[in-house]
Amino acid sequence: MPKAKQPHIAVVGAGAFGGWTALFLRRQGARVTLLDAWGPGNSRASSGGETRVIRATYGPRAVYTHMAVRALALWKEHQQRWHRQLYHPIGVLWLVEHDEQFEQAAIPILRDAHVAFELLQGTDVARRYPQINTDQVRWAILEKDGGYLLARRACAAVLEGFQAEGGEYRQVAVQGPIQPGQGELTSITLSDGTRLTADRFVFACGPWLGPLFPEVVGERVHPTRQEVFFFGTPPGDARYTEPAMPVWADHGSRFMYGIPGNEWRGFKVADDTRGPPFDPTTGDRSPSAAALQIARDYLGYRFPGLKGAPLLEARVCQYEQSGDEHFIIDRHPQAANTWIVGGGSGHGFKHGPAVGELVARLVLTGAAPDEQFRLSRFAR
Ligand SMILES: Cc1cc2nc3c(=O)[nH]c(=O)nc-3n(C[C@H](O)[C@H](O)[C@H](O)COP(=O)(O)OP(=O)(O)OC[C@H]3O[C@@H](n4cnc5c(N)ncnc54)[C@H](O)[C@@H]3O)c2cc1C
């Protein structure tokens, strides 16, 4: 029997979502061309930077707990396959002071998904982690399989794996806006003046999705300015790095979180509060004094031994925020052969492999995406 001709699929965007999608499409036998304007995990991309948290605690949003479990299995499998560490299993500690709704809602879902976790009393947290100020901490969830992932290096590893399995990569920008005609998209214009023809297209362009699809996506994905700070710990003091400390997440008056070891880049402190609108191409990435002050105040409160610690580095990134913080995984409403994938909303990175696996299946089988990921939800 002659083999059926495999489709040629163009994947635009080599970040956490596009890179893994390209890899899984290729593994299923498709001919895949992956394109990126600046490269996987570049400094403008939402997947740029050194590290990202992987956790399964998602309050009442069970879909992401289950997705995180699948993603974790795939992260583990791929770091073994590629002989490199991308996942640091140092645990994630959720500190509960006053508002416990999010963590309470997560507990039955974590159990249902067989996530390994412990419930700790405030006094247990104080005993295990004396470097944390636990005065107001009533209880905590310790996710044992949580931890952190290497971000930009994982994107580079995915690209290498994709190419090793026969995928083609080109560093080139796709010109927008994308306007499919006659029910499907047949080709896209590239920044080198050529056109690329393919049978199917996946656009995983993170915070750039809005301008690429002004009518279909537009403001439904809006980039917000997010700042991350890296503080210096005392010389030789191992209390503030792995394995002495897990990643922590703190639902106090603001949602603050951080990564202690962070690949020796400093004690990472980040504020999950959504910042002002941000242009991912031209936006100035100088850190702001106001955000630094918030990080310093928080650091001094939660980790008294680090009060006044020197700032080592700072990064300005952006969340590609969807209105409801659910991802977008859907076909273009006017082009059945074109898929739009994004809206990571500050929590997408960890899910990269699970999203890639899912999108590859949808694109190859034509199956319908889940309601909660579809663009039509915004019309309601
Ligand atoms: C500060 C910060 C902290 C975060 N923390 C976490 C965390 O702890 N855990 C977690 O799971 N998630 C976290 N996230 C969210 C997560 O990083 C993102 O949701 C995820 O990386 C988004 O991946 P993406 O592939 O959709 O987008 P991107 O990584 O932005 O990739 C899009 C790619 O498309 C390319 N591109 C865009 N337009 C074009 C074009 N026209 N032509 C060709 N290429 C194009 C870009 O160059 C880019 O490489 C965080 C995000 C930020 C900013």
Image (spheres, helix red, strand yellow):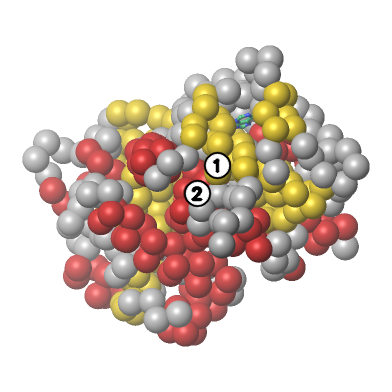
Q: Is residue 262 above or below residue 119?
A: above
Q: Which mark is residue 240?
A: none
Which amino acid lies under the numbered mark 2 shown in the image of this protein? Arg
Image quarter in which the C terminus is found: bottom right
Q: Are marks 1 and 2 in contact (CB under 8 Å)?
A: yes
* Residue shown at 54% from the left, 78% from the top: 105
Residue found farthest to the top? 193
Residue found farthest to the left? 236
Q: Is residue 379 left or right of residue 245?
A: right
Q: Is residue 352 visible?
A: no
Mark 2, residues whose alpha carbon is within 10 Å: few (<14), some, or many (≥20)? many
How many labels were placed on the picture?
2
* Residue shown at 50% from the left, 70% from the top: 65
Residue 38 spot, x, y in % from top left: 52, 24
Residue located beneath label 1 in the image = 32
Residue located beneath label 2 in the image = 26
Q: Is residue 267 visible?
A: yes
Q: CA distance from mark 1 to mark 2?
A: 6 Å
* Residue shown at 45% from the left, 68% from the top: 70
| Viewer-proximal residue among 146 and 123 | 146
Q: Is residue 274 left or right of residue 90?
A: right
Tell me the quarter of the picture where residue 269 sits.
top left
Residue 7 spot, x, y in % from top left: 63, 48
Image quarter in which the N terminus is found: bottom right
* Residue shown at 79% from the left, 29% from the top: 177
Residue 3 spot, x, y in % from top left: 56, 56
Q: Is residue 286 above or below residue 88?
A: above
